[in-house]
């Protein structure tokens, strides 16, 4: 991931990478990343706003994304439809998030609480990644701090999910 504009670069802190919620974001070059996609992350939501993004694909606004939604401190997964709202990551607290974006089999886990998608998340694909902003627009910047992000181009099975969860839980004490 990169950010060439100095004023839009996040801050490297002792805890991770901090995005200011105003104009900080990072992006990859465009690449093929189709559903299903599994995101694993250790993050801290600093502030909460109904439509701010934690991660999104670059192909379209909101594609294969995790964003703040519904009510504080809720986060949800979406492609073209918002599903699987989870309110188990308190503000200013680092926690574990796993999201599987896979049409009607999407789900979102925050810490130890898993929420299955209710409905079809949609069929859009990522086409690259953004941290802390919506797809192609310069909007909805997340005020979030990342310790670690793992992106996998498949829907992980329960064995892989458990292995990665245990790795992140042990590494970060969450």
Image (cartoon, rainbow, N blue to C red):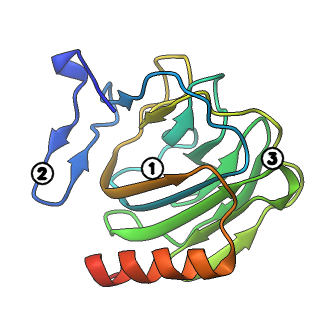
Disc 1: which residue? 48
Q: Is residue 169 visible?
A: yes
Mark 1 or mark 3, which is nearer to you? 3
Residue drawn where x is 49% and y is 43% of the image: 49
Q: Position of residue 31 (x, y in %)?
A: 55, 26
Q: Position of residue 154 (x, y in %)?
A: 67, 55
Of 87 and 64, the residue lying toward us: 64
Quadrant of image for the N terminus: top left
Q: Is residue 70 visible?
A: no
Q: In the rendering, which numbered label is found on residue 121?
A: 3
Residue drawn where x is 82% and y is 37% of the image: 123
Q: Position of residue 129 (x, y in %)?
A: 50, 33
Q: Secondary structure at mark 1?
A: loop
Q: Position of residue 144 (x, y in %)?
A: 35, 48
Quadrant of image for the C terminus: bottom left
C-alpha span from label 2 to label 1: 20 Å
């Amino acid at each position: 991931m990169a950010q060439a504009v100095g004023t839009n670069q996040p801050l490297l802190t002792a805890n991770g990478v901090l995005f200011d919620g105003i104009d900080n974001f990072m992006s990859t070059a465009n690449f093929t990343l189709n559903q299903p996609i599994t995101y694993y992350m250790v993050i801290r939501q600093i502030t909460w706003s109904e439509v701010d993004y934690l991660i999104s694909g670059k192909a379209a606004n909101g594609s294969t994304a995790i964003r703040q939604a519904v009510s504080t401190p809720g986060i949800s997964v979406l492609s073209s439809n918002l599903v699987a709202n989870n309110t188990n990551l308190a503000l200013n607290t680092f926690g574990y998030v796993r999201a599987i974006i896979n049409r009607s089999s999407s789900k979102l886990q925050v810490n130890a609480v898993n929420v299955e998608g209710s409905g079809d998340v949609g069929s859009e694909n990522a086409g690259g990644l953004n941290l802390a902003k919506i797809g192609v627009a310069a909007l909805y910047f997340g005020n979030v701090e990342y310790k670690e992000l793992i992106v996998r181009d498949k829907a992980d099975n329960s064995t892989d999910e458990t292995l990665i969860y245990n790795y992140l839980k042990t590494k970060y004490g969450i």
